[in-house]
Image: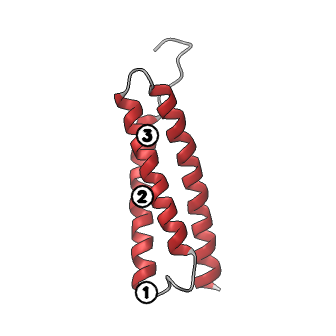
Amino acid sequence: MPENEAPRMSHHILSTSATLMGISFAIVTLVGAFGHAEKTLADDFALLSLFLFFAACLFSYASMKSRKRAALYERTADAVFVIALVSLTLLSLALYFSLVR
C-alpha cells in the first residue's frame, strides 16, 4: 500500500454493521413481544438503528465493489455508521428510562 493511501475500513464497517443490525432487530422483536412498544420509544430507536446499520452495510459493500466512487461510498458508510451508533446509544437510554426505572 502506498504511503499516501489511507487504509480501507469498509470490511470492518460491513461486519460490525451487520452484527449491530441483528442486535437491533432482536431488540425490536423483544420490545414488541413483551408489550412495551406502546409505552416506550425504544422500538422506534431500534428500528432507526436497524435501518441505519443496513444503509451502512450497503454503502460499505458498494465501496468494496466500486472502483470510481469507493472513497465516497466509504465516507458515506462511515458517517451513517456513526449516526447509527448514536441512535443505538439513544436506544439504550430509552430502554433504561422506560423499563429499568
In what element is the residue under mark 1?
loop
Residue at mark 3 to residue at mark 2: CA–CA distance? 14 Å
Please state which of residues 57 and 9 is positioned toward the viewer in this rendering.
57
Alpha-carbon distance for marks 3 and 1? 33 Å
- Residue type, label 3: Phe
How many numbered marks, from 0 up? 3
Q: Earlier in the sequence, mark 3 or mark 1?
A: 1
Q: Which mark is residue 34?
A: 1
Q: Residues within 10 Å of mark 3 (few under 14, many from 20)?
A: many
Q: Quadrant of residue 33?
A: bottom left
* Sequence-first disc among 1 and 2: 2
Pointer 3 residue: 59
Q: Residue at x 39, y 52 (%)?
A: 18
Residue at image position (49%, 82%) is: 37
Q: Residue at x 61, y 82 (%)?
A: 98
Identify which residue is drawn at 44% across, 71% down. 27
